[in-house]
Image: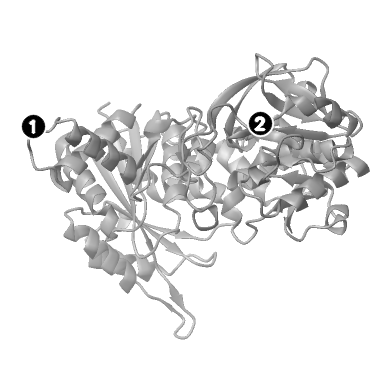
Amino acid sequence: MTKKYIFVTGGVLSGVGKGITAASIGAVLQAKGLSVSVQKCDPYLNVDAGLLNPKEHGECFVTKDGAETDLDLGHYERFLDLELTQKNTTLSGRLLRDLIADERAGKFGGQTVQLVPHLTNAIKKSIHEAAEGDVHIVEIGGTVGDYEGLSFIEAIRDFSQEVGRNNCLFVHVVYVPFLEASQEYKTKPAQNAMAELRSFGIMPDVVAVRTEGHDKPPRSVGEKIAISSGVRPEGIIMMPNVNTVYEVPLTVARDLGPMLSEFTGVTMEPDLTRWENLATRDTTDYAREVTVGLVAKYIDNTDTYLSVTEALKSAAWAENCEVNIRWINSETASDDDFAEVDAVLVPGGFGSRGVEGKIAAATYCLEHNKPYLGICLGMQTAVIAAARRGGVDSANSEEFGAGQGTNVIYLMDGQAGKESTGGTMRLGDYPAVLKEGSLVAKTYGTTEVTERHRHRYEVNQDFVQAIEQGGLVVSGTSPDGRLVEFVESPHCNYFVATQAHPEFKSRPFRPHPLFDGLIRAAASR
Protein backbone atom coordinates (compact mmCIF):
# COMPACT_ATOMS: atom_id res chain seq x y z
CA MET A 1 0.00 0.00 0.00
CA THR A 2 0.99 3.64 -0.45
CA LYS A 3 2.60 4.97 2.73
CA LYS A 4 0.12 6.90 4.84
CA TYR A 5 0.77 9.72 7.30
CA ILE A 6 -1.24 10.75 10.36
CA PHE A 7 -0.54 14.14 11.93
CA VAL A 8 -1.75 14.79 15.49
CA THR A 9 -1.99 18.42 16.59
CA GLY A 10 -3.47 20.07 19.67
CA GLY A 11 -5.61 23.10 20.38
CA VAL A 12 -6.85 25.19 23.34
CA LEU A 13 -4.14 24.00 25.76
CA SER A 14 -1.31 21.50 26.05
CA GLY A 15 -1.31 18.33 28.10
CA VAL A 16 -4.72 17.08 26.95
CA GLY A 17 -3.47 13.75 25.63
CA LYS A 18 -2.03 14.13 22.13
CA GLY A 19 0.64 11.54 22.90
CA ILE A 20 -1.83 8.96 24.22
CA THR A 21 -4.10 9.66 21.25
CA ALA A 22 -1.26 9.17 18.76
CA ALA A 23 -0.09 5.99 20.49
CA SER A 24 -3.64 4.61 20.65
CA ILE A 25 -4.24 5.22 16.94
CA GLY A 26 -1.00 3.37 16.28
CA ALA A 27 -2.10 0.48 18.50
CA VAL A 28 -5.38 0.14 16.60
CA LEU A 29 -3.58 0.17 13.25
CA GLN A 30 -1.19 -2.52 14.51
CA ALA A 31 -4.20 -4.56 15.60
CA LYS A 32 -5.44 -4.29 11.99
CA GLY A 33 -2.20 -5.88 10.81
CA LEU A 34 -0.44 -2.70 9.68
CA SER A 35 3.17 -1.78 10.45
CA VAL A 36 3.49 1.58 12.21
CA SER A 37 6.21 4.10 12.93
CA VAL A 38 5.86 7.20 15.10
CA GLN A 39 7.59 10.53 15.65
CA LYS A 40 7.36 13.46 18.08
CA CYS A 41 8.10 16.95 16.73
CA ASP A 42 8.64 19.48 19.52
CA PRO A 43 8.87 23.21 18.72
CA TYR A 44 11.03 23.89 21.81
CA LEU A 45 14.29 25.65 20.97
CA ASN A 46 16.22 22.89 22.73
CA VAL A 47 18.61 20.48 21.07
CA ASP A 48 17.13 17.61 23.10
CA ALA A 49 15.03 17.09 26.22
CA GLY A 50 18.00 16.31 28.46
CA LEU A 51 18.14 19.72 30.15
CA LEU A 52 14.39 20.37 30.39
CA ASN A 53 13.13 20.72 33.96
CA PRO A 54 11.42 17.42 34.89
CA LYS A 55 9.19 19.29 37.34
CA GLU A 56 7.63 21.10 34.37
CA HIS A 57 7.96 18.59 31.55
CA GLY A 58 7.94 15.21 33.26
CA GLU A 59 10.52 12.50 32.79
CA CYS A 60 13.24 12.53 30.18
CA PHE A 61 12.80 9.30 28.24
CA VAL A 62 15.92 7.72 26.73
CA THR A 63 15.93 5.64 23.56
CA LYS A 64 18.19 2.68 22.86
CA ASP A 65 20.62 4.82 20.85
CA GLY A 66 20.84 7.50 23.54
CA ALA A 67 18.33 10.16 22.47
CA GLU A 68 17.08 12.21 25.42
CA THR A 69 13.44 12.76 24.58
CA ASP A 70 10.03 13.90 25.67
CA LEU A 71 7.97 11.47 27.79
CA ASP A 72 5.61 10.84 24.86
CA LEU A 73 8.31 8.58 23.38
CA GLY A 74 7.70 6.40 26.42
CA HIS A 75 3.98 6.23 25.62
CA TYR A 76 4.83 5.23 22.07
CA GLU A 77 7.21 2.48 23.14
CA ARG A 78 4.83 1.06 25.75
CA PHE A 79 1.72 1.16 23.54
CA LEU A 80 3.37 0.01 20.31
CA ASP A 81 6.11 -2.21 21.79
CA LEU A 82 8.71 -0.53 19.60
CA GLU A 83 12.29 0.50 20.30
CA LEU A 84 12.61 4.03 18.97
CA THR A 85 15.73 5.99 18.04
CA GLN A 86 17.08 9.51 17.51
CA LYS A 87 15.11 9.94 14.31
CA ASN A 88 11.80 9.48 16.15
CA THR A 89 12.21 12.75 18.02
CA THR A 90 12.70 16.17 16.45
CA LEU A 91 13.24 19.45 18.32
CA SER A 92 13.55 22.90 16.79
CA GLY A 93 16.87 23.50 18.50
CA ARG A 94 18.55 20.61 16.73
CA LEU A 95 17.16 21.60 13.34
CA LEU A 96 18.16 25.22 13.79
CA ARG A 97 21.64 24.25 14.99
CA ASP A 98 22.17 22.09 11.92
CA LEU A 99 20.65 24.73 9.65
CA ILE A 100 23.02 27.43 10.90
CA ALA A 101 25.98 25.03 10.64
CA ASP A 102 25.08 24.36 7.00
CA GLU A 103 24.77 28.09 6.33
CA ARG A 104 28.21 28.72 7.86
CA ALA A 105 29.63 25.94 5.71
CA GLY A 106 28.32 27.64 2.58
CA LYS A 107 25.86 24.88 1.68
CA PHE A 108 23.12 27.33 0.69
CA GLY A 109 25.22 29.02 -1.99
CA GLY A 110 24.49 32.59 -0.95
CA GLN A 111 20.73 32.13 -0.45
CA THR A 112 18.94 34.10 2.24
CA VAL A 113 18.24 31.46 4.88
CA GLN A 114 14.63 31.66 6.11
CA LEU A 115 12.17 29.74 8.24
CA VAL A 116 10.24 29.07 5.03
CA PRO A 117 11.45 27.18 3.08
CA HIS A 118 14.69 26.19 4.80
CA LEU A 119 13.48 25.25 8.29
CA THR A 120 10.23 23.78 6.94
CA ASN A 121 12.24 21.72 4.46
CA ALA A 122 14.38 20.41 7.34
CA ILE A 123 11.21 19.42 9.22
CA LYS A 124 9.82 17.63 6.17
CA LYS A 125 13.13 15.84 5.68
CA SER A 126 13.07 14.63 9.29
CA ILE A 127 9.57 13.23 8.76
CA HIS A 128 10.61 11.38 5.60
CA GLU A 129 13.67 9.94 7.38
CA ALA A 130 11.61 8.67 10.34
CA ALA A 131 8.78 7.22 8.26
CA GLU A 132 8.80 3.43 8.13
CA GLY A 133 6.21 0.76 7.53
CA ASP A 134 2.66 1.30 6.30
CA VAL A 135 1.65 4.28 8.44
CA HIS A 136 3.80 6.99 10.01
CA ILE A 137 2.24 8.93 12.90
CA VAL A 138 3.62 12.39 13.71
CA GLU A 139 2.68 14.28 16.86
CA ILE A 140 3.29 18.03 16.85
CA GLY A 141 4.03 19.26 20.37
CA GLY A 142 2.44 22.31 21.99
CA THR A 143 -0.73 23.91 20.68
CA VAL A 144 -1.56 25.38 17.29
CA GLY A 145 -0.84 29.09 17.36
CA ASP A 146 2.29 28.92 19.52
CA TYR A 147 4.90 31.17 17.89
CA GLU A 148 7.61 28.53 17.97
CA GLY A 149 5.32 25.94 16.40
CA LEU A 150 4.29 27.86 13.28
CA SER A 151 7.06 26.39 11.13
CA PHE A 152 5.96 22.86 12.02
CA ILE A 153 2.34 23.54 11.07
CA GLU A 154 3.44 25.05 7.76
CA ALA A 155 5.77 22.09 7.18
CA ILE A 156 3.07 19.43 7.63
CA ARG A 157 0.65 21.44 5.44
CA ASP A 158 3.25 21.55 2.68
CA PHE A 159 4.17 17.91 3.31
CA SER A 160 0.57 16.84 2.68
CA GLN A 161 0.66 18.57 -0.70
CA GLU A 162 3.85 16.76 -1.66
CA VAL A 163 2.73 13.23 -0.74
CA GLY A 164 -0.93 13.76 -1.62
CA ARG A 165 -3.67 15.02 0.67
CA ASN A 166 -5.44 11.66 0.39
CA ASN A 167 -2.39 10.03 1.99
CA CYS A 168 -2.54 12.27 5.09
CA LEU A 169 -4.98 12.25 7.99
CA PHE A 170 -5.04 15.29 10.28
CA VAL A 171 -6.19 14.66 13.85
CA HIS A 172 -6.77 17.71 16.03
CA VAL A 173 -7.10 17.16 19.80
CA VAL A 174 -9.06 19.93 21.51
CA TYR A 175 -10.26 20.56 25.04
CA VAL A 176 -13.92 21.33 25.80
CA PRO A 177 -14.42 22.67 29.35
CA PHE A 178 -17.52 22.08 31.47
CA LEU A 179 -18.81 25.10 33.40
CA GLU A 180 -20.27 24.13 36.75
CA ALA A 181 -22.15 27.42 37.10
CA SER A 182 -24.24 26.94 33.96
CA GLN A 183 -23.93 23.14 33.85
CA GLU A 184 -22.91 23.09 30.20
CA TYR A 185 -20.03 22.25 27.93
CA LYS A 186 -18.53 25.25 26.15
CA THR A 187 -17.25 24.54 22.65
CA LYS A 188 -16.10 28.06 21.80
CA PRO A 189 -12.40 27.46 22.73
CA ALA A 190 -12.40 24.37 20.51
CA GLN A 191 -14.05 26.25 17.66
CA ASN A 192 -11.42 28.98 17.92
CA ALA A 193 -8.61 26.39 17.97
CA MET A 194 -9.95 24.76 14.81
CA ALA A 195 -10.42 28.11 13.11
CA GLU A 196 -6.76 28.88 13.87
CA LEU A 197 -5.67 25.56 12.36
CA ARG A 198 -7.73 26.24 9.24
CA SER A 199 -6.16 29.70 8.97
CA PHE A 200 -2.82 27.93 8.39
CA GLY A 201 -4.30 25.93 5.54
CA ILE A 202 -5.05 22.67 7.35
CA MET A 203 -8.56 21.27 7.50
CA PRO A 204 -8.64 18.52 10.15
CA ASP A 205 -10.20 15.19 9.24
CA VAL A 206 -10.71 14.15 12.86
CA VAL A 207 -11.38 16.19 15.97
CA ALA A 208 -10.77 14.38 19.25
CA VAL A 209 -12.74 16.17 21.96
CA ARG A 210 -11.17 15.87 25.42
CA THR A 211 -13.45 16.50 28.39
CA GLU A 212 -13.17 16.15 32.15
CA GLY A 213 -15.19 13.55 34.01
CA HIS A 214 -15.99 10.02 32.92
CA ASP A 215 -19.38 10.73 31.36
CA LYS A 216 -19.58 11.18 27.63
CA PRO A 217 -20.73 14.69 26.68
CA PRO A 218 -24.16 15.01 25.06
CA ARG A 219 -24.34 14.30 21.34
CA SER A 220 -25.12 17.97 20.73
CA VAL A 221 -21.52 18.89 21.67
CA GLY A 222 -20.11 16.82 18.83
CA GLU A 223 -22.77 18.06 16.41
CA LYS A 224 -21.99 21.67 17.27
CA ILE A 225 -18.28 21.16 16.69
CA ALA A 226 -18.96 19.36 13.40
CA ILE A 227 -21.22 22.14 12.11
CA SER A 228 -18.90 24.97 13.15
CA SER A 229 -15.73 23.29 11.84
CA GLY A 230 -16.86 21.57 8.67
CA VAL A 231 -15.52 18.23 9.91
CA ARG A 232 -17.69 15.24 9.07
CA PRO A 233 -19.78 14.02 12.04
CA GLU A 234 -18.04 10.63 11.94
CA GLY A 235 -14.74 12.50 12.35
CA ILE A 236 -15.74 13.84 15.78
CA ILE A 237 -14.76 11.47 18.58
CA MET A 238 -15.46 12.09 22.25
CA MET A 239 -12.64 11.32 24.66
CA PRO A 240 -13.73 11.83 28.27
CA ASN A 241 -11.50 10.71 31.12
CA VAL A 242 -11.10 6.96 31.43
CA ASN A 243 -10.23 4.66 34.31
CA THR A 244 -6.99 3.70 32.58
CA VAL A 245 -5.14 5.07 29.55
CA TYR A 246 -5.13 1.53 28.19
CA GLU A 247 -8.84 1.94 27.44
CA VAL A 248 -8.11 4.66 24.89
CA PRO A 249 -7.24 2.25 22.03
CA LEU A 250 -10.68 0.68 22.56
CA THR A 251 -12.31 4.12 22.30
CA VAL A 252 -10.34 4.94 19.16
CA ALA A 253 -11.25 1.61 17.54
CA ARG A 254 -14.94 2.04 18.34
CA ASP A 255 -15.36 5.66 17.30
CA LEU A 256 -12.66 6.09 14.66
CA GLY A 257 -12.46 2.57 13.27
CA PRO A 258 -14.49 3.16 10.07
CA MET A 259 -12.52 6.29 9.20
CA LEU A 260 -9.18 4.51 9.77
CA SER A 261 -10.35 1.68 7.51
CA GLU A 262 -11.35 4.17 4.83
CA PHE A 263 -8.07 6.06 5.15
CA THR A 264 -5.77 3.03 5.02
CA GLY A 265 -7.88 0.88 2.71
CA VAL A 266 -7.55 -1.99 5.20
CA THR A 267 -11.03 -3.05 6.28
CA MET A 268 -9.99 -5.93 8.54
CA GLU A 269 -11.37 -5.49 12.05
CA PRO A 270 -8.64 -4.90 14.65
CA ASP A 271 -7.98 -7.67 17.15
CA LEU A 272 -8.03 -5.76 20.44
CA THR A 273 -8.24 -8.77 22.75
CA ARG A 274 -5.01 -7.96 24.55
CA TRP A 275 -6.06 -4.34 25.05
CA GLU A 276 -9.39 -5.46 26.49
CA ASN A 277 -7.56 -7.82 28.83
CA LEU A 278 -5.07 -5.11 29.80
CA ALA A 279 -7.83 -2.59 30.57
CA THR A 280 -9.54 -5.24 32.71
CA ARG A 281 -6.34 -6.01 34.60
CA ASP A 282 -5.70 -2.33 35.28
CA THR A 283 -9.20 -1.80 36.70
CA THR A 284 -9.44 -5.06 38.68
CA ASP A 285 -9.53 -4.89 42.46
CA TYR A 286 -7.03 -7.55 43.45
CA ALA A 287 -7.21 -9.35 46.77
CA ARG A 288 -3.47 -8.95 47.37
CA GLU A 289 -2.01 -5.48 47.78
CA VAL A 290 1.53 -4.21 48.13
CA THR A 291 2.65 -0.70 49.00
CA VAL A 292 5.84 0.56 47.41
CA GLY A 293 7.49 3.66 48.83
CA LEU A 294 8.90 5.76 45.98
CA VAL A 295 11.59 7.99 47.52
CA ALA A 296 11.86 11.04 45.28
CA LYS A 297 12.15 14.81 45.27
CA TYR A 298 9.68 15.75 42.51
CA ILE A 299 6.62 14.34 44.23
CA ASP A 300 4.40 17.21 43.06
CA ASN A 301 4.66 16.06 39.44
CA THR A 302 4.31 12.30 39.13
CA ASP A 303 5.02 12.47 35.36
CA THR A 304 8.67 12.90 36.38
CA TYR A 305 8.67 9.17 37.20
CA LEU A 306 6.06 8.02 34.69
CA SER A 307 7.99 5.04 33.30
CA VAL A 308 8.78 3.89 36.85
CA THR A 309 5.16 3.94 37.99
CA GLU A 310 4.00 2.23 34.79
CA ALA A 311 6.67 -0.46 35.27
CA LEU A 312 5.44 -1.06 38.83
CA LYS A 313 1.86 -1.43 37.61
CA SER A 314 2.85 -3.88 34.88
CA ALA A 315 4.79 -5.99 37.37
CA ALA A 316 1.87 -5.97 39.82
CA TRP A 317 -0.57 -7.15 37.14
CA ALA A 318 1.79 -10.01 36.29
CA GLU A 319 1.72 -11.02 39.97
CA ASN A 320 -2.08 -10.58 40.20
CA CYS A 321 -1.87 -7.98 42.90
CA GLU A 322 -2.57 -4.30 43.46
CA VAL A 323 0.32 -1.87 43.85
CA ASN A 324 -0.16 1.26 45.93
CA ILE A 325 2.55 3.83 45.36
CA ARG A 326 3.32 5.94 48.40
CA TRP A 327 5.30 9.05 47.55
CA ILE A 328 8.02 9.70 50.10
CA ASN A 329 9.67 13.11 50.00
CA SER A 330 13.40 12.41 49.97
CA GLU A 331 14.10 15.71 51.76
CA THR A 332 12.00 14.75 54.79
CA ALA A 333 12.12 10.94 54.64
CA SER A 334 12.47 9.06 57.92
CA ASP A 335 12.63 5.46 59.13
CA ASP A 336 8.94 5.69 60.00
CA ASP A 337 8.17 6.28 56.31
CA PHE A 338 10.20 3.24 55.26
CA ALA A 339 8.65 1.05 57.97
CA GLU A 340 5.13 1.71 56.68
CA VAL A 341 5.71 0.30 53.18
CA ASP A 342 6.27 -3.22 51.86
CA ALA A 343 9.13 -2.24 49.54
CA VAL A 344 11.23 0.79 48.65
CA LEU A 345 12.20 2.11 45.23
CA VAL A 346 14.71 4.92 44.74
CA PRO A 347 14.61 6.24 41.14
CA GLY A 348 17.20 8.14 39.15
CA GLY A 349 17.89 11.84 39.45
CA PHE A 350 20.49 14.57 39.55
CA GLY A 351 21.64 17.06 42.16
CA SER A 352 22.25 16.89 45.90
CA ARG A 353 18.75 17.84 47.06
CA GLY A 354 17.15 14.96 48.92
CA VAL A 355 20.16 12.64 48.56
CA GLU A 356 20.54 11.98 52.30
CA GLY A 357 16.95 10.76 52.39
CA LYS A 358 17.73 8.31 49.58
CA ILE A 359 20.85 7.10 51.40
CA ALA A 360 18.72 6.65 54.52
CA ALA A 361 16.23 4.57 52.51
CA ALA A 362 18.97 2.20 51.32
CA THR A 363 20.44 1.99 54.84
CA TYR A 364 17.06 1.11 56.34
CA CYS A 365 16.41 -1.61 53.75
CA LEU A 366 19.86 -3.14 54.28
CA GLU A 367 19.38 -3.23 58.02
CA HIS A 368 15.75 -4.41 58.03
CA ASN A 369 15.75 -6.80 55.06
CA LYS A 370 13.15 -4.75 53.23
CA PRO A 371 12.81 -5.24 49.44
CA TYR A 372 14.69 -2.48 47.65
CA LEU A 373 15.18 -1.51 44.01
CA GLY A 374 17.66 1.27 43.23
CA ILE A 375 17.76 2.84 39.79
CA CYS A 376 20.75 4.90 38.62
CA LEU A 377 21.10 7.44 41.45
CA GLY A 378 19.24 4.86 43.54
CA MET A 379 22.19 2.49 43.02
CA GLN A 380 24.73 5.20 43.77
CA THR A 381 23.02 6.12 47.05
CA ALA A 382 22.86 2.42 47.97
CA VAL A 383 26.60 2.12 47.37
CA ILE A 384 27.21 5.24 49.47
CA ALA A 385 25.06 3.76 52.26
CA ALA A 386 27.02 0.49 52.17
CA ALA A 387 30.40 2.27 52.15
CA ARG A 388 29.41 4.31 55.20
CA ARG A 389 28.34 1.12 56.98
CA GLY A 390 31.66 -0.42 55.88
CA GLY A 391 33.78 2.22 57.59
CA VAL A 392 34.04 5.12 55.13
CA ASP A 393 32.07 7.47 57.34
CA SER A 394 32.08 10.43 54.94
CA ALA A 395 31.47 8.39 51.80
CA ASN A 396 29.70 10.35 49.11
CA SER A 397 29.68 11.17 45.40
CA GLU A 398 31.89 13.63 43.58
CA GLU A 399 28.63 15.04 42.23
CA PHE A 400 27.93 16.24 45.78
CA GLY A 401 31.44 17.42 46.59
CA ALA A 402 33.22 14.27 47.78
CA GLY A 403 36.99 14.38 47.49
CA GLN A 404 39.78 11.82 47.32
CA GLY A 405 39.31 9.15 50.00
CA THR A 406 35.53 9.52 50.22
CA ASN A 407 34.49 9.57 46.55
CA VAL A 408 32.90 6.12 46.30
CA ILE A 409 31.00 7.54 43.32
CA TYR A 410 33.30 9.40 40.95
CA LEU A 411 33.28 11.19 37.62
CA MET A 412 33.62 9.14 34.46
CA ASP A 413 36.90 9.37 32.63
CA GLY A 414 36.91 12.28 30.20
CA GLN A 415 33.88 14.00 31.70
CA ALA A 416 35.64 16.52 33.95
CA GLY A 417 34.50 20.06 33.22
CA LYS A 418 31.33 18.96 31.43
CA GLU A 419 29.06 18.62 34.45
CA SER A 420 26.69 21.40 33.38
CA THR A 421 26.39 20.54 29.69
CA GLY A 422 24.00 18.29 27.84
CA GLY A 423 24.79 15.18 25.86
CA THR A 424 27.94 14.22 27.78
CA MET A 425 26.64 11.24 29.72
CA ARG A 426 26.60 7.51 29.16
CA LEU A 427 23.36 7.34 27.21
CA GLY A 428 21.37 4.52 25.62
CA ASP A 429 21.94 0.76 25.54
CA TYR A 430 24.98 -0.79 27.22
CA PRO A 431 25.60 -4.49 27.86
CA ALA A 432 26.34 -6.02 31.24
CA VAL A 433 27.59 -9.39 32.43
CA LEU A 434 25.95 -10.78 35.58
CA LYS A 435 27.70 -12.96 38.12
CA GLU A 436 26.72 -16.62 37.92
CA GLY A 437 24.33 -17.54 40.73
CA SER A 438 23.64 -13.94 41.70
CA LEU A 439 20.16 -12.72 42.53
CA VAL A 440 20.09 -10.48 39.45
CA ALA A 441 21.12 -13.38 37.21
CA LYS A 442 18.30 -15.49 38.67
CA THR A 443 15.86 -12.60 38.30
CA TYR A 444 16.75 -12.03 34.66
CA GLY A 445 17.17 -15.72 33.90
CA THR A 446 20.43 -14.99 32.09
CA THR A 447 23.93 -13.66 32.72
CA GLU A 448 24.04 -11.26 29.76
CA VAL A 449 21.69 -8.27 29.62
CA THR A 450 21.44 -4.92 27.88
CA GLU A 451 19.86 -1.93 29.60
CA ARG A 452 19.50 1.77 28.89
CA HIS A 453 21.59 4.34 30.73
CA ARG A 454 21.52 8.04 31.50
CA HIS A 455 24.25 9.07 33.90
CA ARG A 456 27.70 10.56 34.20
CA TYR A 457 29.10 9.20 37.49
CA GLU A 458 30.29 5.65 38.22
CA VAL A 459 31.05 3.43 41.20
CA ASN A 460 34.69 3.80 42.27
CA GLN A 461 35.95 0.21 42.56
CA ASP A 462 38.77 1.30 44.87
CA PHE A 463 36.12 1.11 47.60
CA VAL A 464 34.77 -2.36 46.80
CA GLN A 465 36.08 -3.81 50.09
CA ALA A 466 34.28 -1.18 52.19
CA ILE A 467 31.12 -1.58 50.10
CA GLU A 468 31.18 -5.34 50.69
CA GLN A 469 31.74 -4.86 54.41
CA GLY A 470 28.69 -2.60 54.37
CA GLY A 471 26.47 -5.34 52.98
CA LEU A 472 26.59 -5.13 49.18
CA VAL A 473 28.40 -7.10 46.51
CA VAL A 474 29.00 -6.24 42.87
CA SER A 475 26.87 -8.67 40.89
CA GLY A 476 27.12 -7.20 37.39
CA THR A 477 29.68 -5.21 35.43
CA SER A 478 30.40 -3.99 31.94
CA PRO A 479 31.89 -6.79 29.77
CA ASP A 480 35.42 -5.49 30.45
CA GLY A 481 34.78 -5.34 34.21
CA ARG A 482 35.65 -1.63 34.47
CA LEU A 483 32.16 -0.32 35.23
CA VAL A 484 29.80 -1.49 37.96
CA GLU A 485 26.33 -2.13 36.55
CA PHE A 486 24.59 -4.06 39.36
CA VAL A 487 24.94 -4.46 43.10
CA GLU A 488 22.92 -6.60 45.49
CA SER A 489 22.82 -7.67 49.10
CA PRO A 490 23.47 -11.36 49.82
CA HIS A 491 21.91 -10.83 53.26
CA CYS A 492 18.53 -9.57 52.05
CA ASN A 493 15.74 -11.39 50.26
CA TYR A 494 15.59 -8.73 47.55
CA PHE A 495 17.98 -5.82 47.54
CA VAL A 496 18.98 -5.00 43.96
CA ALA A 497 20.31 -1.82 42.41
CA THR A 498 21.40 -1.02 38.88
CA GLN A 499 23.22 1.84 37.22
CA ALA A 500 20.76 1.51 34.34
CA HIS A 501 17.16 2.61 33.84
CA PRO A 502 15.23 -0.67 33.45
CA GLU A 503 11.90 1.17 33.52
CA PHE A 504 12.45 2.29 29.93
CA LYS A 505 12.25 -1.31 28.70
CA SER A 506 9.20 -2.34 30.68
CA ARG A 507 5.99 -2.96 28.71
CA PRO A 508 2.40 -3.31 29.93
CA PHE A 509 2.27 -6.75 28.31
CA ARG A 510 5.82 -7.70 29.34
CA PRO A 511 6.93 -6.39 32.76
CA HIS A 512 10.61 -5.89 33.45
CA PRO A 513 12.23 -8.66 35.55
CA LEU A 514 13.69 -6.28 38.17
CA PHE A 515 10.30 -4.68 38.86
CA ASP A 516 8.63 -8.08 38.83
CA GLY A 517 11.17 -9.28 41.38
CA LEU A 518 10.50 -6.30 43.64
CA ILE A 519 6.73 -6.79 43.56
CA ARG A 520 7.07 -10.55 44.13
CA ALA A 521 9.34 -9.99 47.11
CA ALA A 522 7.00 -7.36 48.57
CA ALA A 523 3.95 -9.57 48.11
CA SER A 524 5.60 -12.51 49.85
CA ARG A 525 6.41 -10.62 53.05
Give percent across and percent down for residue 388: 84, 40
Give percent across and percent down for residue 253: 44, 45
**Quadrant into which the N terminus falls:** top left
Which residue type does callout 2 highlight?
A: Glu
Residue at image mark 2 = 458
Give percent across and percent down for residue 327: 72, 57
Look at the image and tell me whether residue 202 can be seen. yes
- Position of residue 78 in the picture relative to residue 91 (left or right): right
Which residue type does callout 1 highlight?
A: Gly
Comparing 56 with 402, the one in front is: 402
Instruction: Classify 40 as above or below 215.
Output: above
Look at the image and tell me whether residue 443 can be seen. no
Give percent across and percent down for residue 510: 64, 32
Q: Tell me if mark 1 has few (under 14), some (14-19) or many (20+) residues whose alpha carbon lies within 10 angstroms of its own.
A: few
Comparing 497 with 514, the one in front is: 497
Q: Tell me if mark 2 has few (under 14), some (14-19) or many (20+) residues whose alpha carbon lies within 10 angstroms of its own.
A: many
> Under tag 1, what secondary structure?
loop
* Residue appearing at x 40%, y 28% in the figure: 35
> Under tag 2, what secondary structure?
strand
Q: Mark 2 to mark 1: distance in Å?
A: 47 Å
- Position of residue 29 in the picture relative to residue 365 (left or right): left
Quick check: marks 2 and 1 in contact, CB under 8 Å?
no
Asked which quadrant contains residue 474, the reply is top right
**Quadrant into which the C terminus falls:** top right
Residue at image mark 1 = 109
Comparing 174 with 259, the one in front is: 174
* Residue appearing at x 55%, y 34% in the figure: 416
